[in-house]
Amino acid sequence: MTRVRVGELLARAGTVLEEAGIAGARRDAMLLLAHALGVDRLGLLTLGRDALVEADGFEPLLARRARREPLAFIVGRQGFWTLELAVSPDTLIPRADSETLVEALLEARPERGAVRRVLDLGTGTGCLLLAALSEYPDAWGVGVDLSASACRLAASNALANGLATRSAFLCGDWTAPVRGGFDVILGNPPYVPTPDLSGLMPEVAAHEPARALDGGPDGLDAFRTMMPAIASRLAPGGLCVLEVGAGQAEDVAGLGVAIGLERAGTRADLGGVVRAVLLEAGSGAQKTFGTSAVRS
C-alpha cells in the first residue's frame, strides 16, 4: 500500500472539494480522512501533517463527497445536541437548526421532572425525541414515522445512546394510534414548498428523502393534517413544539389556534430565522386512546 503524508492528502482533497463548490471544503477533507483512517478529528491532528499514512480507502470517499453526497451519509453519523446518531438516506440528516426546538422546550419546561410523556411526530433518526429524553430523566417517549427503515434506525440510535428502555417507535402517519395524553409533542414535518424543492442544495435535493421535505404548494400541508392529531393527543397544559420554515411561523400558529390550541411563543435559530413554534393545550384538552406503541 502507498504511504502518503497527511498534509499532502488534505491539501489535494481540499482543492478537489473547493472545485466541486463545497463550502467548508477543508473541514470536510479532514473529517473524511479521519474517517478513512479510523480516527477522530483530534486523532488526525495528533498524527500531524508530516505523518505517513496508508489511506487507500480515502479516494472513494473523496469522490463521493465531490459528487455532493452529504458528508453525514458518507461517514454514517451526525452529532445532534449531546448525542451521536447514525444516519441513512431513509431520513433527514439532523441539523443544528432543529436543536432550536430542544432549546425552546427546555426554556418552556425548565423543571426536569415535569415532563413524563413525549411524542415525536416524524421522528426520522429519533434526534428530537432522544435529545428530549436525554434532558428529562423521568420521561418516556414514542417516535412515529411513516418509514419502517427510519423507525429501525431511530430504535438503533436509542439503544446506542442508552435510551432504549425509555423509548418506543411506531411505523405510521400523523394519525397513527398512540395511547394516552402527552406532556410534550415535538415535530419536524415536511415544510419546503414544492416549487422550492428544485432550488435546494444538491446534497439535500438529490440525496435526502423528498417525502420528508415536500410540504405541498405552500409548505403547510403536513401542518394542516397533523394539527388535529396534536390537539387530541396533548394532555391538559401540554406543550407542542414544531419546526417551521422561514416565514411560516404565523401561519402554523394560526392553524393551531383555529382548533383550540394557545400560542406559547416562538424561537429563532442561530441565523435569526424563526424556527420553532410553541403551542399549548388548555386545561380542557382531550385525551384519546388507541393501540399502544411497542417498546423497541
Image (cartoon, rainbow, N blue to C red):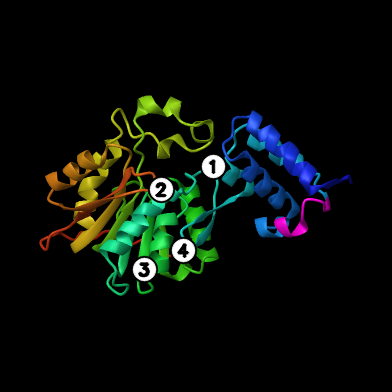
Mark 1–mark 3 Cα distance, whole angstroms, equals 27 Å
Pointer 3 and pointer 4: residues touching (CB < 8 Å)?
no
Q: Based on the displayed image, in which of its 4 quarters is residue 273 positioned?
A: top left
Residue drawn at point x = 59 percent, y = 30 percent: 21
Task: Give residue 19's position: percent from left, percent from top.
Answer: 65, 29
Residue tagged 3: 140
Amino acid identity at mark 2: Asp
Label 1 Cα crowd, 10 Å radius (few <14 / some 14-19 / many 20+): some
Tell me the mark number nearer the camera, choosing from 3 and 4.
Answer: 3
What number of labels is visible?
A: 4
Q: Is residue 213 left or right of residue 255?
A: right
Tell me the mark number nearer the camera, choosing from 1 and 2.
Answer: 2
Please tell me the numbered disc located at residue 296: 4
Q: Which callout, 4 or 1, points at the residue further toward the start of the chain?
A: 1
Between 179 and 26, the one nearer to me in the picture: 26
Q: Is residue 208 left or right of residue 41?
A: left
Tell me the mark number nearer the camera, choosing from 2 and 3.
Answer: 2
Q: Which callout, 1 or 3, points at the residue further toward the start of the chain?
A: 1
Amino acid identity at mark 1: Pro
Residue tagged 2: 97
Please tell me the numbered disc located at residue 89: 1
Amino acid identity at mark 4: Ser
Q: Is residue 173 left or right of residue 258?
A: right
Q: Which callout, 2 or 4, points at the residue further toward the start of the chain?
A: 2
Please tell me the numbered disc located at residue 10: none
Task: Give residue 179's position: percent from left, percent from top.
Answer: 28, 62
Mark 2–mark 3 Cα distance, whole angstroms, equals 24 Å
The magenta segment: 45-52
Mark 4–mark 1 Cα distance, whole angstroms, equals 21 Å
Examine the structure image and report whether residue 124 is included in the region drawn in magenta: no
